[in-house]
Image: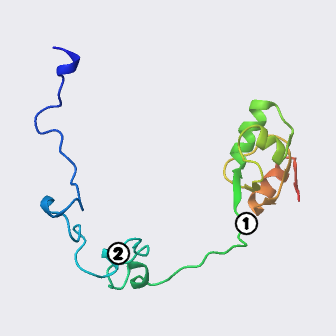
Amino acid sequence: MRLQSLKPAQGSTKNRKRIARGQGSGKGGTATRGHKGAQSRSGYSKKVGFEGGQMPLQRRVPKFGFKNNNKVVMKPINLDDLQALSEAKKLTEITPEVLRENGMIGKGDVVKVLGRGELKAKLTVKAHKFSKTAQEAIEKAGGSASVEE
């Protein structure tokens, strides 16, 4: 076997269709574009979503729903998360900065403390919002919950 004798497998390659190369090719004249009309002209491009005159899908399907641009999405942090964090890092004060440093929230996240789990540690918690049960549980454990702007 020599490099100059290598060939692709039989039937694996095809010659491309050479359109508009004269009448003898069988693809001359209109060059497979048909007669007249926009699609036969150069520079033609159909609009996005055009379905040949049929009512397009985006117009057949009814509009619905509503997006509230003013919605504030809050990141929930539960009492059991606070308990685990305070035990692991030996903390007495938890703020959004502490949560961010420990990878529990992202930059610019709004934190809401929720009441799932049990809190045994006496913690000073600062967050953007608290649920009623979470605030009561923090104060019951001897800590304090203050809203941070």
Rounded to the nearest angstrom, the CA distance separating label 1 from label 2 is 52 Å
- Is any atom of residue 61 visible in this view? yes
Q: Which residue is mark 2?
A: 41
Q: Which mark is residue 84?
A: none
Q: Residue at x 19, y 14 (%)?
A: 2
* Figure check: 12 above or below 138: above
Q: Residue at x 18, y 40 (%)?
A: 13
In the image as oriented, which residue stretches furthest toward the left?
10
Give whichever of 138, 60 is nearer the camera: 60
State the image coordinates of residue 27 (x, y, percent, origin top left): 18, 63
State the image coordinates of residue 67 (x, y, percent, origin top left): 62, 75
Helix or strand or loop: what does disc 1 sit on? loop
Q: Quadrant of the rendered structure where residue 83 is? A: top right
Q: Quadrant of the rendered structure where residue 145 is? A: bottom right
Q: Which mark is residue 72?
A: 1
* Figure check: 114 above or below 86: below
